[in-house]
Image: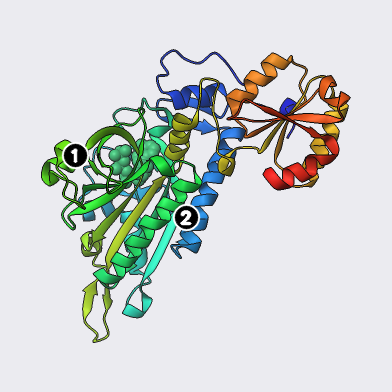
Amino acid sequence: MRQSSLFTKTTKEISKEEESLNAKLLLRGGFINKEMAGVYSFLPLGFAVLKKIEDIVRKEMKNVMEAQEVLMPAIHPLKNYEVTGRDKIDVLFHTKLNGGGDLVMGQSHEEIVVPLFKKFISSYKDLPQGIFQIQSKFRNELRAKSGILRGREFLMKDLYSFHTDNDCFDSYYKRAEESYHNIYKKLLIGDKTYFTYASGGSFSKYSHEFQTLSDAGEDQIYLCEDCVIAINKEIIDDTKNCPRCGKKGDNLKVEKSIEVGNIFPLGSRFSDSFNLTYKDMNGKERPVIMGCYGIGISRAMGAIVEILSDDKGIVWPKSIAPFSVHLISLGEDEEAEKVYNLLKKEGVEVLFDDRDKGAGEKFAESDLIGIPYRMVVSKKTLEKEAVEIKKREEKEVEIIKVNEIVNYAKENI
Ligand code: ATP
Ligand code: MG
């Protein structure tokens, strides 16, 4: 894409009220626009990143978790929440139908997915099943000062699994744990993301969170460096020590972290509410055992910005960068255009800075936007029939001949 036709522009002027690093960088780069506290538009560059995170998560859900994708509604009847007793939770946005009838905005989808499954599940032969969606959630969060880490409207992947018994559930839950680790590795935050024990509610001792170390985090975890796991501060009082090796809480390291996902054993908590049962082999009615598994898609994007940026701007991982190459013409538009076309023909995603601006400004903007490869075409590089290539996170440049660009792209980008 030509940068001259991109409708967004980078800006230095953002509201002084903006506290969080992820919001500052994403607003300055033109990735997002703030509509009100906790509510953002995702603009072309930001939307491209979001879609790439979605794709990584979607592939794992389909291929590894063998789950089917659906799209459930964003407005829900309040009466379903009365059935589960969640009608009084504080984050619910309430609204009404014109003709009467209370509605809430979807903050999670147990109240929709369980009645839905009741229509299709009757026998043990119908189980197990997993379904997921990637969809906007609405929560009246008290504080929304962490940029896209805590939205009042935000994008979540939610998966729900349905099983005949605990053994079947346990193996699926274990698979989800591995799959989540894969996802965070692909997003380049794997080395900072810890499998964390959290309180489980009434149906199981623990649920589990995936917590990514960051000073921007609103959570605190106790790290057991021997086991490479953590315990959420909220449960450490009950547990007192590492649930794996028993190491004393006093010897665990306390760190700030961002909850980028969680997996939760639901037991028959929601099946009981809606009487979701199946007939076992002997024809006996039994409750369906469930799990739910969330990933904050937009929060993950914010976490990546927090963790991988430097003093010049964002440093996107290749896997989710809005473009692979930022091609910059310094007054050599015709030659740069040739490189643009060569790369495009190879299927490389290129943002082509064809604007009439100085080198300093173009480079600073390029660093802010954070595309993994910067390629410069200038009078100086053309004297060598070459382009200058620099990786976003490195200082050194490489000079590559124009007729070698395609090979370079095939091998590296
Ligand atoms: P938190 O404790 O941070 O409020 P939660 O326990 O309410 O999170 P869930 O309801 O389980 O989270 O949602 C699943 C995932 O969705 C979380 O792990 C997180 O990554 C993401 N998430 C939750 N709330 C928000 C929010 N307000 N904005 C962005 N992402 C969120
Ligand atoms: Mg919450």
Q: Does mark 1 have its CB less than 8 Å from ligand 1?
A: no
Where does the image place residue 106, in percent across and percent down from the top left?
36, 46
Q: Nearer the viewer, residue 388 or 345?
A: 388
Secondary structure at numbered mark 1: helix
- Please indicate whether residue 62 sits to the left or right of residue 195 in the image: right
In the rendered structure, which amino acid carries the disc numbered 1? Answer: Glu
Is label 2 or label 1 in front? 1
Secondary structure at numbered mark 2: loop
Kindly tell me whether residue 102 is visible in this rendering: no
Q: Nearer the viewer, residue 250 or 118?
A: 250
408 is higher (above) or lower (below) than 336 = below
Residue behind mark 2: 71
Q: Which mark is residue 183?
A: none
Where does the image place residue 113, in percent across and percent down from the top left?
36, 59
Q: Does mark 2 have its CB less than 8 Å from ligand 1?
A: no
Is tag 2's residue or tag 1's residue first in the polypeptide sequence?
2
Where does the image place residue 155, in percent across and percent down from the top left?
44, 42
Q: Which mark is residue 234?
A: 1
Instruction: Give the quarter of the figure containing the N terminus.
Output: top right
Label 2: how many residues lie within 10 Å, few (<14), some (14-19) or many (20+)?
Answer: few
Residue at horizontal 61%, vertical 24%?
Answer: 367
Q: Nearer the viewer, residue 410 or 220?
A: 410
